[in-house]
Amino acid sequence: AAAGTRARLDDGKLSVYVVHPWTVAGLLWLALRILLRGTSGSRALDAFSVESCVVHSRAAPLQVARDGEVDEMDSPVRFRVLPGALRVVAPVGPRATEDS
């Protein structure tokens, strides 16, 4: 699957990506490679799915991006799936258009 995609949103898994380049040039090259070839086969990126994970860092505090906002958090940072935490309301059947 392509980076940032999955077959289902309710599979109870978090997508985790670990990026290995530490230079700006390395990150830019990795981003270009992912756009052109996807995530598979890259030694500069590890991708896996988990139900929960804990991120430890020597840096304090960490800047963590969540839901479009960046917050400062102390290490370790814990992530886990909360089944059923998000309710989605959508119409049943084909999407109505102005012409119909």
Image (cartoon, rainbow, N blue to C red):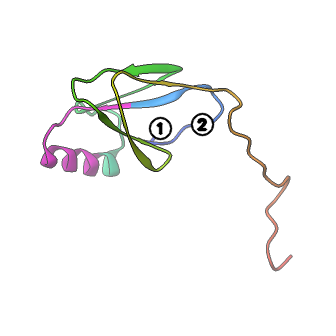
Residue at screen point 24% across, 44% down: 30
Does residue 72 show up magenta in the picture? no
Where is residue 95 shown, x and y percent of the image? 79, 63
Labelled disc at residue 98: none
Residue 42 place in picture, x, y as percent: 27, 34
Q: For residue 19, what is the image quadrant?
A: top left
Amino acid type for the residue under numbered disc 2: Ala
Residue at image coords 18%, 36%: 21
Q: What is the span of residues highlighted in magenta in the rendered image? A: 17-33
Kindly identify the residue that appears in the image at 68 percent across and 33 percent down.
85
Element type at marker 1? loop
**91 on left or right of 80:** right
Pick the residue in front: 94 or 17: 17
Q: Which residue is mark 2?
A: 7
Going from N to C along the chain, the mark reached first, 1 or 2, is 1
The residue indicated by pointer 1 is 1
Q: Quadrant for residue 87, please give it.
A: top right
The residue at 78%/49% (across/down) is 89
The answer to whether mark 1 and mark 2 are in CB contact below 8 A is: yes
Label 1 – label 2 distance at C-alpha: 8 Å
- Residue 45 or 65: which is nearer the viewer? 65
| Mark 2, other Cα within 10 Å: few <14 / some 14–19 / many ≥20 | few
Q: Position of residue 86 (x, y in %)?
A: 68, 38
